Image (cartoon, rainbow, N blue to C red):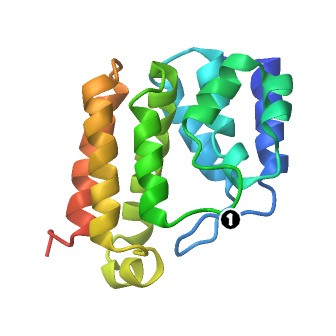
Amino acid sequence: MLYSYRIEQAIRAAALLHRTQVRKGPVPLPYVTHLFAVAFILSDYTDDEDVIIAGLLHDTLEDTEYSEEELREDFGRRVFEIVRAVSEQTEGEKGPWKERKKAYAKQLTEAPQEALMVSCADKIHNMRSTIEGYYGNHEGFLRELAKPSVEDQVWFHQTVSNILNRRLKNDIVHEFNHVFTEYKKFALNEDR
């Protein structure tokens, strides 16, 4: 990844917008660690500045007060479109978990390649974080993170996997497949 003024602005925006948030898990890390990880994963597969910026900002519409208009004005239409394509419902009350995940998956069936890459990097880091955070502590995982059920979480990741493997034309999908295999073994406790 090439460092640039726009990347620095995205880092600052992500840090400020998510400054009070922490990641779920055994260690409450600042949320921006996830956003930086997603950007670094993306930088292994593209040098497209807009995609990397979208990786840094992919949760802003969903999890902060940052508006669509502000995102578009600050980072441009292309970054906005990528982030919008990987954001769950951003207006009104959030619906039930499974309905939100079905809607997200439907969005991916029509999303541009760049958004599929961001979704892929996001899921890679989420699954890796779960495995690493709860390695050797499956009971802790079940107690703290397995809501909704483990089976529903695996269903969601499998749904995303099917879409990514069918539509994404970038080698990042191979990393996703490797991590997803490990995640399923961990989540379903198949290593016992």
Q: Which residue type carries mark 1?
A: Val
Residue 26 seen in the figure: yes
Q: Residue at x 26, y 31 (%)?
A: 165
Could you tell me residue 62's position as x and y percent?
67, 50
Q: Residue at x 55, y 38 (%)?
A: 86
Q: Quarter-wise, where is residue 81 in the image? A: top right
Q: Residue at x 57, y 48 (%)?
A: 88
Identify the residue under disc 1: 22
Q: Quarter-wise, where is residue 8 in the image? A: top right
Camera-nearest residue between 98 and 119: 98
On screen, residue 76 above or below 80: above
Position of residue 64 in the picture relative to residue 121 (left or right): right
Could you tell me residue 46's position as x and y percent?
50, 17
Q: Quarter-wise, where is residue 6 in the image? A: top right
Could you tell me residue 3's position as x and y percent?
72, 20
How many residues crowd around disc 1 within 10 Å: few (fewer than 14), some, or many (20 or more)? some
